């Protein structure tokens, strides 16, 4: 019999296994709304682990709360694209409607409102999460309708389904998205090839990872297969956190069978029987349909023991849901999270191919990569390699958002020029810049639009954010700087402190008190982070400012005081506690610089 | 030459399985560090031990020594980067050396002298951080914590108590304590624990011994940290 105590039930559901700590905490919170010290203690006791382990997880992930939240938790997406679509005034509208401050809970405990990192709804933003369920296309009317529902205390299950309807917006389908997949076909093809045959075809295809690093997938699989150790694992990285990227959301929504077949094929090739799909917390709303797909596939032996009747081809998948931490997209941080810990990247080497989940050989692949692997199994590596460029074979799905007429997914053969994408998306005129591959990527200007999307030219995770001539590129960089300061895991000194130093200096510039000194310092801190940071997050966290300053200098310069240096201390601000204590607001209570 | 890497074209021998930092230490070459301690698993978080290996900047404490590596340890450029790391550590916490009872035995302070850090350089964050003086024998002052996790590792791996942990993300990370109240007094911590004696700074202070040894006559008052032959012994006053 299941326990009625929700904490006990969550612990039981995962067999009291601390490896599932992140999942247990997530479910305990879902039942109670937040995680009191008492709840954390109970989880620790039931798992017989120190409370510090529970606390360190709770405090690490943005979607875990150690203070009460509203019965309705509203998190407005705060990517730069959400800002361009007006999320700030919608936030103000919500705050005004409920009479709360950002981050606070209303007096009646009904609602709390805050901002959150990119929710992957950039093509239909501004986005929002209501108790972790995605709401796209926010408008004043929609905000008011939602506020009415909340005030009437309408349970989420009774809200109009239309509010939660997320579009796929596939604007241009290429070889992957336009080919309907017959369920089981890729598995059959893989079985026909045999385990070694699959590896050979993968290597022949020269398929490279679509998550950013671009490592050859066949070589990664081969390394995992050849690594010593009894148990091997497959991990699908569906922690699509790079702001501006949302292609995996569409693949997870409309092509889950293809992803799972790709995972099974990977398992077959390297000799793994267990796979994990790590789903970012922002996509938790997709879990029920992913679970349903897994059940369907098990029923017809496309997953489970003896897949398609092939003796020895045993493979199954479980879904781990993240809880709001961009850094978990880094593959070793992701493994830490799957093992129930805070997502702090590990020291590499050793690499996951030899020392991954529980220190065992593990192949970690991006959602799109695994989908492409099914194409390789079906059509063969040589056919796959005919598409794209020599060093970037196959197709790439781009997530196009920002100032264009037709945002959404665009799938191209690798090698497509940036200008072509812009034209297809209806952004041919008056484009100031495109941020390719998100805040950790590069800012491209019109003179670079002839460059091509490919690993050897402009590599990308898929994000493609378009900024029109009316946009302030300083604000773009500022948004990204805040993002990195919020998402730094804190493990290594240069990133932990450097991202916050960046934020401090960019805010000084935004207030109109910055000088050339801050610019020089920003460039220096960027260099320190780039060379010394433990993982890619810190290594790329300074790119936005670097690119912005070098390519859109006037946007920065017009905010600078015409000085070499201005002190960081704001004397008038320093007087504000004294004003608060004395209740004075007169001229004598202010320090004003002489005009 | 087998089992040798080079620093400035000089061959440095190593034993297979040694990290670069360990091999340098065996050869009497000082590589600065804070989060490293020979008794515990390498961590690689403070980044003071950065060196250049075949053109790439890496942490000497986590990279294995191997034959053919061309290693650069001591250049003005690397030392300037280390100075910046020290300055970052100083401004993110609250470090007031003249009023700190660890002064003279503190590795952060000693490294500040070593790398000629004359100012904090960056704008101070001045965070508000808790002091936990609940325990009869020790004080936790989070203002001075540099998040090296040596106490976390010592308590977990040597004392087998897991008294300490790190909670939070980014700049919000701070030392947390394994007890129902979160206070040290209610934990399994004992002054005889290894964890009580590994803090390289003044975040874990032993009560009643703060000024037994006068300031001015302490370990790093007497000799620079780079002269240490055995940096595993953390000085206490």
Image (tube, rainbow, N blue to C red):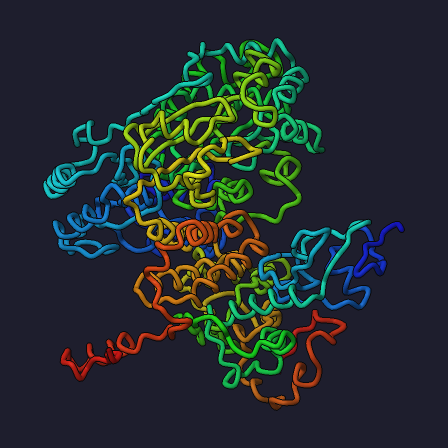
Q: Can you give x and y, in whole percent of width and height, for residue A428 in the image? A: 33, 31
Q: Residue lying at the far front in this picture: please name it.
A: A447
Compared to B48, does A351 lie above or below?
A: above
Q: Can you give x and y, in whole percent of width and height, for residue A423 in the image? A: 36, 27
Residue A431, by quadrant, is top left
Q: Residue at x 30, y 27 (%)?
A: A406
Compared to A16, does A560 lie above or below?
A: below
Q: Is residue A14 visible?
A: yes
Q: Residue lying at the far right in this picture: please name it.
A: B1
Q: Can you give x and y, in whole percent of width and height, for residue A303 in the image? A: 50, 18
Locate residue B129 relative to residue A472 in the image: left or right: right
Q: Residue at x 85, y 51 (%)?
A: B3
Q: Nearer the viewer, residue A482 or A255?
A: A482
Image quadrant in which the C terminus of chain B is located:
bottom right
Q: Residue at x 49, y 31 (%)?
A: A453
Q: Residue at x 60, y 40 (%)?
A: A358
Q: Can you give x and y, in whole percent of width and height, for residue A87 in the image? A: 24, 45
Q: Nearer the viewer, residue A45 or B35?
A: B35
Q: Is residue A12 visible?
A: no
In this rendering, the count of numbered labels is: 0
Q: Nearer the viewer, residue A587 or B106?
A: A587
Compared to A413, does B60 lie above or below?
A: below
Residue A470, by quadrant, is top left
Locate residue A343 relative to residue A362 in the image: left or right: left
């Amino acid at each position: 019999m299941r326990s009625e105590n929700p904490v006990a039930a969550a612990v039981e559901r995962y067999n009291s296994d601390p490896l599932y700590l992140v999942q247990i905490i997530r479910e305990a919170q879902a039942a109670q709304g937040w995680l009191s010290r008492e709840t954390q203690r109970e989880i620790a006791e039931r798992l017989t682990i120190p409370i510090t382990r529970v606390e360190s997880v709770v405090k690490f992930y943005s979607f875990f709360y150690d203070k009460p939240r509203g019965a309705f938790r509203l998190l407005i997406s705060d990517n730069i694209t959400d800002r361009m679509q007006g999320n700030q005034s919608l936030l103000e509208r919500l705050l005004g409607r409920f009479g709360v401050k950002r981050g606070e809970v209303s007096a009646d405990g009904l609602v709390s409102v805050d901002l959150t990192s990119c929710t992957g709804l950039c093509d239909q933003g501004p986005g929002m999460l209501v108790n972790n369920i995605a709401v796209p296309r926010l408008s004043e009317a929609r905000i008011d309708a939602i506020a009415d529902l909340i005030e009437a205390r309408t349970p989420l299950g009774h809200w109009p389904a239309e509010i939660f309807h997320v579009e796929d917006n596939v604007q241009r389908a290429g070889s992957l998205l336009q080919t309907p997949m017959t369920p089981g076909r890729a598995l059959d093809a893989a079985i026909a090839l045999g385990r070694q045959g699959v590896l050979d075809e993968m290597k022949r295809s020269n398929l490279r990872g679509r998550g950013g690093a671009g490592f050859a997938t066949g070589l990664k699989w081969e390394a995992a297969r050849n690594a010593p150790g009894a148990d091997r694992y497959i991990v699908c990285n569906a922690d699509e956190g790079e702001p501006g990227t949302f292609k995996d959301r569409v693949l997870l929504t409309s092509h889950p069978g293809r992803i799972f077949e790709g995972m099974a094929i990977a398992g077959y090739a390297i000799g793994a029987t267990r796979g994990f799909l790590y789903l970012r917390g922002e996509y938790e709303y997709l879990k029920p349909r992913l679970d349903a797909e897994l059940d369907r596939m098990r029923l017809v032996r496309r997953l489970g023991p003896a897949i398609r009747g092939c003796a020895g081809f045993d493979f199954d998948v479980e879904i781990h849901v993240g809880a709001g931490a961009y850094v978990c997209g880094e593959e070793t941080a992701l493994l830490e999270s799957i093992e129930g810990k805070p997502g702090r990247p590990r020291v590499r080497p050793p690499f996951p191919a030899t020392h991954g989940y529980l220190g065992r050989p593990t192949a970690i692949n991006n959602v799109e990569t695994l989908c492409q692997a099914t194409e390789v199994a079906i059509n063969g590596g040589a056919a796959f390699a005919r598409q794209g460029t020599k060093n970037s074979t196959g197709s790439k799905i781009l997530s196009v958002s920002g100032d264009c007429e037709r945002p959404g997914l665009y799938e191209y053969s690798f090698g497509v020029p940036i200008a072509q994408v812009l034209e297809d998306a209806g952004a041919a005129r008056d484009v100031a810049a495109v941020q390719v591959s998100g805040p950790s990527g590069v800012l491209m200007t019109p003179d670079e639009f002839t460059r091509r999307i490919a690993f050897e030219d402009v590599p990308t995770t898929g994000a493609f954010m378009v900024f029109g001539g009316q946009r302030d590129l300083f604000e773009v960089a500022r948004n990204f700087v805040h993002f990195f300061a919020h998402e730094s895991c804190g493990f290594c000194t240069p990133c932990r402190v450097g991202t916050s130093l960046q934020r401090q200096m960019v805010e000084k510039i935004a207030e109109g008190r910055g000088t050339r000194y801050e610019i020089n310092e920003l460039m220096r801190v960027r260099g320190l982070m780039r060379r010394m940071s433990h993982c890619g997050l810190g290594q790329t966290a300074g790119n936005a400012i670097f690119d912005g300053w070098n390519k859109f200098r006037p946007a920065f310069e017009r905010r600078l005081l015409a000085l070499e240096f201005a002190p960081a201390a704001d004397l008038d601000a320093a007087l504000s506690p004294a004003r608060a204590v004395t209740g004075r607001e007169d001229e004598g209570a202010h320090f004003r610089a002489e005009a | 030459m087998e089992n040798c890497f080079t620093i400035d074209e000089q061959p440095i021998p190593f034993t297979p399985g040694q990290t670069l930092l360990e091999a340098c230490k065996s050869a009497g070459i000082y590589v600065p560090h804070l989060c490293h301690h020979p008794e515990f698993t390498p961590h690689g978080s403070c980044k003071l031990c950065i060196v250049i290996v075949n053109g790439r900047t890496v942490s000497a404490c986590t990279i294995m020594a191997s034959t053919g590596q061309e290693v650069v340890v001591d250049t003005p450029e690397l030392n300037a980067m280390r100075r910046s790391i020290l300055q970052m550590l100083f401004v993110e916490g609250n470090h007031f050396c003249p009023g700190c009872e660890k002064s003279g035995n503190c590795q952060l302070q000693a490294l500040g002298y070593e790398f000629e850090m004359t100012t904090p350089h960056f704008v101070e964050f001045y965070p508000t951080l808790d002091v936990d003086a609940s325990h009869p024998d020790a004080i936790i002052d989070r203002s001075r914590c540099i998040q090296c996790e040596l106490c976390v590792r010592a308590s977990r791996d040597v004392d087998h108590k897991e008294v300490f942990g790190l909670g939070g993300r980014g700049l919000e990370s701070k030392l947390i304590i394994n007890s129902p109240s979160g206070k040290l007094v209610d934990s399994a911590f004992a002054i005889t624990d290894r964890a009580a004696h590994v803090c390289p700074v003044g975040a874990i202070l032993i009560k009643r011994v703060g000024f037994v040894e006068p300031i001015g006559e302490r370990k790093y008052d007497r000799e620079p940290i780079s002269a240490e032959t055995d940096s595993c012994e953390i000085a206490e006053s």
